[in-house]
Image (spheres, grey):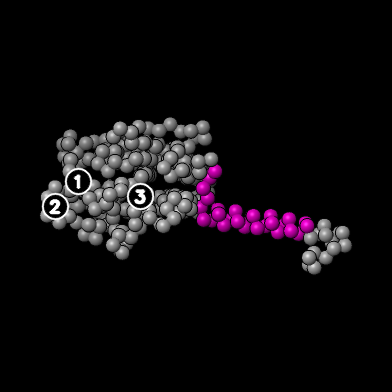
């Protein structure tokens, strides 16, 4: 299979020339906050890994892996994916899609949120088995784009499957003692967390660090800082009261 024509004289379309939408819509009310939660909580880790900001995160964005007519048939749009060591803008323009024949780096991890029975996310159909347009999503990530980690999240089952590309084939990963799946290149773990985010209490897909500490989202980080500041104030007040009991005015110190 060739992603692009071999003749360098042929002009290949880039992200500004390919459609950025196929006209479909998000399938349920949980998918959008789930993507936000993943991005918000892992961003501090990625900012540490990439101090110059050289990474990209896609949410329902097209990854073009082959030229077809119409173009959308040659793309997959993962619910969430992360690409390391690429510029967030391309030629000074916002990214409309991720075009494999114009890029060097494949996404490190792709995550799909199951909204049906999961057969679409696990479809291993090869385009060489018949109609090229019927390449299965699992096959595309494994054989065409070659994404090192592929996660399939099913909120209704409170479960996530993680596959790692080993010797050109996906092997299903086993969870660690915490029930999480380590994504070693990122230094994080992926797993299920039962709780409330925004106004929905659900089994959410979340990140932990390599020591098993939950990676907080922005609201949780703010609340943690608020609690820390309150604890500091309480300690300071206790110390001030103790000094007054000893006849010392803390305001003069």
In 3D space, how far apart are the residues under numbered discs 3 and 2 (Cα atoms)? Answer: 26 Å
Residue 180 visible in the shown view: yes
**x 40%, y 33%: residue:** 173
Where does label 1 land, which residue?
3
Mark before the other along the chain sequence, 3 or 2: 2
Mark before the other along the chain sequence, 1 or 2: 1
Image quadrant in which you'd find residue 54: bottom left
Q: Nearer the viewer, mark 3 or mark 2?
A: 2
Q: Are there few (<14), some (14-19), or many (20+) residues within 10 Å of tag 3?
A: many
- Residue 213 lies in the magenta stretch: yes
70 sits to left or right of 55: left
Mark 2: which secondary structure?
Answer: loop
209 sits to left or right of 246: left
State the mark number for residue 114: none
**x 39%, y 37%: residue:** 162
State the mark number for residue 8: 2
Residue 119 visible in the shown view: no
Mark 1: which secondary structure?
Answer: loop
Dominant secondary structure, magenta: helix
In 3D space, how far apart are the residues under numbered discs 1 and 2 (Cα atoms)? Answer: 13 Å
The residue positioned farthest toward the bottom in the image shown = 252
**x 86%, y 59%: residue:** 245
Quadrant where the N terminus sits is: top left
x, y percentage for residue 68?
A: 17, 49
Give, as a single range, the part of the protein colored magenta: 212-239
Mark 3: which secondary structure?
Answer: strand
Mark before the other along the chain sequence, 1 or 3: 1
214 sits to left or right of 149: right
Q: Nearer the viewer, residue 19 or 82?
A: 82
x, y percentage for residue 96?
A: 29, 58
State the mark number for residue 83: 3
């Amino acid at each position: 299979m060739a992603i692009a024509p071999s003749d360098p004289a042929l002009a290949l379309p880039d992200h500004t020339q390919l459609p950025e939408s196929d006209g479909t819509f998000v399938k349920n009310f949980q998918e959008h906050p789930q993507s936000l939660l993943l991005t918000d909580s892992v961003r501090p880790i990625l900012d540490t890994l990439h101090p110059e900001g050289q990474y990209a995160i896609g949410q329902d964005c097209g990854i073009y892996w082959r030229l077809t007519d119409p173009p959308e048939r040659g793309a997959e749009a993962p619910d969430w994916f992360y690409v390391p060591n690429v510029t967030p803008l391309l030629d000074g323009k916002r990214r409309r899609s991720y075009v494999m024949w114009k890029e060097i780096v494949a996404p490190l991890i792709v995550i799909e949120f199951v909204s049906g029975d999961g057969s679409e996310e696990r479809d291993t159909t090869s385009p060489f088995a018949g109609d090229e347009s019927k390449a299965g999503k699992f096959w595309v990530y494994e054989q065409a784009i070659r994404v090192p980690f592929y996660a399939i999240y099913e909120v209704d089952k409170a479960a996530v499957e993680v596959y790692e590309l080993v010797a050109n084939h996906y092997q299903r990963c086993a969870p660690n003692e915490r029930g999480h799946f380590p994504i070693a290149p990122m230094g994080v773990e992926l797993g299920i967390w039962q709780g409330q985010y925004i106004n929905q209490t659900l089994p959410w897909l979340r990140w932990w660090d390599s020591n098993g500490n939950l990676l907080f989202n922005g609201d949780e980080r703010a609340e943690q800082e608020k609690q820390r500041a309150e604890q500091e104030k309480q300690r300071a007040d206790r110390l001030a009261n103790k000094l007054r009991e000893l006849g010392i005015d803390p305001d003069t110190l």
